[in-house]
Image: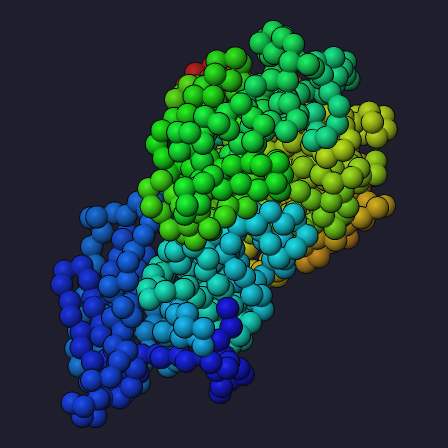
């Protein structure tokens, strides 16, 4: 929200009161409290006029500083609040002298100026990060008697802002006005399904505004050298999160708000759906599944979209017996083919559903102030909305999910959860404005918890559309309703990269686009992008998404990239474990891996898949693509071509290729199976070593599908000698020296020549190889 009228004036009817100077500082072992009037105090009479701001500085964990700004502390405070995971043992240092007061946590310090003028500045060992100066912090009143608290944090020259959720607008957020308010707006507008009041910058820090309600951001769009954020009311709280690397910022942010769970290994395979409004029954489903088997396309998950239930009755959690007369038998037969089953749900109960009257009578649905059920006709006629603040309503909802799991369902597509009304009353008295975004957290948590309860930890997977802070704990999320165009494919990637920079580790999208039907050309290009994403789903609106509906070449392309992903699973699952342990997304904006390369700051049409693989999807007919390779040696994974980085490249690719480059000093774990994503990754694993530089090292960890470490391998080079050591329970591993065709000596194993590389097979019970190049 904008409050000013240019640099000097406020908008009509707007009054802004800002801290003018420090009046008093109080401190204890953990907290620094500052009192600041809005004007210079010359006489005792000036103390009779407010506002007097109260600011508290503390630290919930190392390298994170919490800022709490109050005007009136007596305002009634209703939940919900984001669930945080502070470290109560995090030490702080507090100093106070005549010039300044400061609080330090780890390598992060806040300094409050006590001399003339007002300023709050944040530093790490690299220097000043950001700060709030004169007329920055503020208490705002408007002519309609609304009140707001705002903050303005400085942006340095060349500083870029990222994150704020899954946003499909430009990747760098400078110049944008952004409201943190979940909406069902597709992928082609400024609206977003997953709004996260957190941003990070290329200066090595992040800012998390700890408010579930709407937070209004002006990112260099009101004051071009400031990020302004504001909330309604009398109180504002935010956290400064130190890096200094972007990766470390995400690690700290997700330590505070929750790390993602590791999705089950099977979820990384190919998903196929019935699509949305298409006609289907068991015969149709079997035609699709058998068609994939006959064409040797590995398929791992089959998803039933909305019309598995009877029309007008979503959700009743009952199969439409007119087309699925034997759902238990059908699911059993599908699972005998090696498939996992996903079904669509949402948190709404249509009036025609047999559950509506029960939900109404027991108070399980959101109500108006007069006690009536809140209803509307948008999406399902007369629908009500489940009140997940009511524990009994949660159990009611969960009981129907348990029944489906017992029937054979393995996961749920948790659709919707964005259009949550604010003119309602919640069971627990929650503030409906704060609940608008937070509802998505409660909804997805209920479903995720049921899956963990029934299937076990590590076996729960959602396919969720809506989210807020903390929702990253319940993967997977997908990008919503996109058009079937190259433009929509590119905007989807922007949204996914933005979400990854907001603390979410796993993300997917509808291969081929959701709305209408893509051309065969676009479908094949999107397949390559989709199978080189965290999760991979074929889905659409009004048409089927099986490849033979496009052309026979699409069959070959889908088979090629699905099998490629299965072979890459040891490497990809290691990246998934990193996402859970450290908070790094699997699909990483280039700046995460190359924060010191200015050319990477704006890149949103390519990404790193894990820490070693660069992917540049193709976004135009003809197969032409322009992309940037950072400095260093790179090897095309598919062809073995070696190129020098440090600049832009233009290439042209057929449908079974795209820019897929491996950076130097990489050790990629490649699996033996290409027909499934869930297998023993350490068994017969082949470790591909790329361009190990003199003095360089490369390492990798291979996990089993349950997330347990099975094998760790490290390679080091000194001059012409390379040392490879392995530790773990797997004895049948090998090394492929990519791009190397001759060795002068080998100790500890035997060498086999391939067409363009050398494979090293260690001797039995040997955990170390020594190579002379």
Whether residue 9 is visible: yes
Q: Looking at the image, is 642 positioned above or below residue 74?
A: above
Q: Looking at the image, is 227 positioned above or below residue 306?
A: below
Whether residue 414 is visible: no
Image quarter in which the C terminus is found? top right
Q: Residue at x 57, y 50 (%)?
A: 183
In the displayed structure image, the side of residue 286 where residue 444 appears, left or right: left
In the displayed structure image, the side of residue 393 where residue 668 appears, left or right: right
On the image, the x and y values in percent for residue 70 come to: 28, 67
Q: Nearer the viewer, residue 197 or 140?
A: 140
Q: Residue at x 75, y 17 (%)?
A: 284
Q: Residue at x 18, y 59 (%)?
A: 30
Q: Nearer the viewer, residue 95 or 291?
A: 291
Which residue is farthest bottom? 42
Residue 615: image quadrant is top right
Q: Nearer the viewer, residue 135 or 666?
A: 135
Q: Residue at x 56, y 39 (%)?
A: 416
């Amino acid at each position: 929200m904008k409050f000013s009228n240019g640099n000097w004036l406020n908008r009509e009817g707007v009054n802004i009161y800002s801290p003018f100077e420090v009046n008093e500082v109080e401190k204890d072992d953990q907290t620094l409290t500052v009192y600041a009037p809005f004007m210079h105090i010359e006489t005792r009479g000036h103390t009779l006029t407010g506002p007097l701001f109260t600011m508290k500085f503390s630290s919930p964990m190392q390298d994170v500083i919490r800022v709490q700004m109050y005007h009136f502390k007596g305002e009634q405070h209703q939940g919900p609040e984001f669930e945080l995971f502070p470290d109560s043992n995090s030490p702080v240092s507090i100093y106070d002298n005549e010039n300044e007061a400061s609080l330090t946590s780890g390598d992060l310090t806040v300094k409050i100026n006590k001399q003339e003028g007002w300023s709050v500045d944040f530093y790490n060992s690299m220097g000043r990060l950001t700060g709030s100066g004169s007329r920055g912090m503020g208490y705002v009143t408007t002519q309609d008697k609304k009140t707001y608290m705002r903050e303005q944090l400085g942006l340095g020259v060349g500083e870029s802002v990222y994150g704020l959720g899954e946003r499909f607008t430009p990747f760098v957020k400078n110049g944008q006005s952004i409201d943190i308010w979940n909406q069902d707006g597709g992928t082609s507008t400024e609206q977003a399904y997953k709004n996260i009041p957190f941003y990070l910058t290329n200066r090595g820090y992040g800012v998390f505004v700890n408010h579930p309600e709407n937070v209004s951001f002006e990112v260099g769009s009101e004051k071009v050298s400031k990020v302004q954020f504001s909330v309604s009311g009398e109180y504002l709280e935010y956290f400064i999160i130190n890096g200094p690397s972007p990766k470390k910022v995400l690690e700290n942010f997700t330590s505070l708000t929750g790390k993602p769970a590791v999705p089950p290994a099977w979820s990384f395979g190919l998903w196929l759906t019935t699509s949305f409004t298409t006609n289907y029954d068991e015969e149709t489903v079997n035609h699709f599944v058998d068609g994939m088997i006959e064409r040797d396309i590995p398929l791992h998950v089959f998803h039933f979209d909305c019309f598995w239930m009877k029309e007008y009755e979503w959700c009743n959690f009952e199969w439409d017996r007119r087309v699925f007369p034997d759902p238990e038998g059908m699911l059993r037969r599908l699972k005998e083919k090696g498939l996992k089953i996903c079904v669509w749900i949402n948190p709404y109960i249509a009036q025609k559903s047999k559950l509506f009257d029960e939900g109404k009578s027991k108070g399980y649905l959101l109500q108006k102030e007069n006690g009536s059920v809140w209803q509307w006709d948008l999406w399902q006629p007369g629908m009500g909305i489940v009140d997940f603040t009511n524990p009994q309503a949660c159990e009611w909802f969960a009981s129907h999910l348990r029944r489906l799991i017992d029937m054979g369902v393995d996961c749920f597509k948790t659709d919707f959860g964005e259009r949550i009304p604010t003119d309602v009353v919640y069971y627990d008295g929650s503030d409906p404005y704060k609940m608008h975004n937070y509802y998505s957290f409660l909804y997805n948590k209920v479903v995720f918890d049921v899956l963990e309860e029934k299937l076990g930890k590590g076996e729960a997977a959602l396919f969720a559309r809506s989210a807020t802070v903390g929702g990253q704990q319940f993967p997977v999320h997908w990008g919503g309703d996109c058009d079937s165009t190259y433009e929509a494919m590119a905007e989807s990637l922007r949204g996914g990269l933005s979400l990854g920079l907001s603390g979410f580790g796993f993300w997917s999208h509808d291969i081929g686009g959701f709305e209408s039907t893509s051309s065969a050309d676009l479908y094949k290009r999107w397949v390559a992008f989709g199978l080189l994403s965290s999760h991979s789903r074929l889905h659409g609106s009004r048409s089927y998404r099986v490849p033979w509906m496009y052309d026979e070449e699409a069959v070959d392309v889908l088979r090629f990239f699905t099998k490629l992903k299965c072979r890459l699973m040891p490497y990809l699952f290691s990246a998934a474990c990193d996402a859970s342990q450290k908070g790094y997304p699997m699909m990483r904006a280039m700046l995460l891996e190359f924060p010191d390369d200015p050319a990477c700051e704006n890149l949103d049409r390519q990404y790193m898949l894990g820490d070693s693989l660069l992917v540049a999807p193709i976004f135009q007919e003809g197969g032409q693509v322009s992309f940037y390779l950072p400095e260093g040696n790179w090897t095309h994974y598919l062809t073995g071509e070696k190129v020098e980085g440090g600049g832009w490249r233009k290439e042209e690719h057929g449908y079974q290729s795209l820019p897929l480059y491996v950076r130097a000093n990489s050790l990629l774990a490649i699996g033996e199976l290409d027909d499934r994503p869930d297998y023993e990754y350490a068994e017969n694993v082949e470790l591909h070593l790329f361009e190990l530089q003199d003095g360089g090292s490369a390492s990798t960890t291979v996990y089993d599908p349950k997330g347990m470490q099975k094998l760790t391998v490290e390679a080091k080079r000194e001059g012409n000698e390379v040392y490879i050591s392995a530790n773990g329970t797997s004895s049948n591993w090998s090394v492929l020296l990519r791009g190397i065709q001759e060795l002068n000596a080998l100790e500890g194993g035997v060498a086999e020549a391939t067409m363009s590389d050398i494979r090293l097979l260690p001797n039995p019970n040997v955990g170390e190889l020594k190579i002379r190049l």
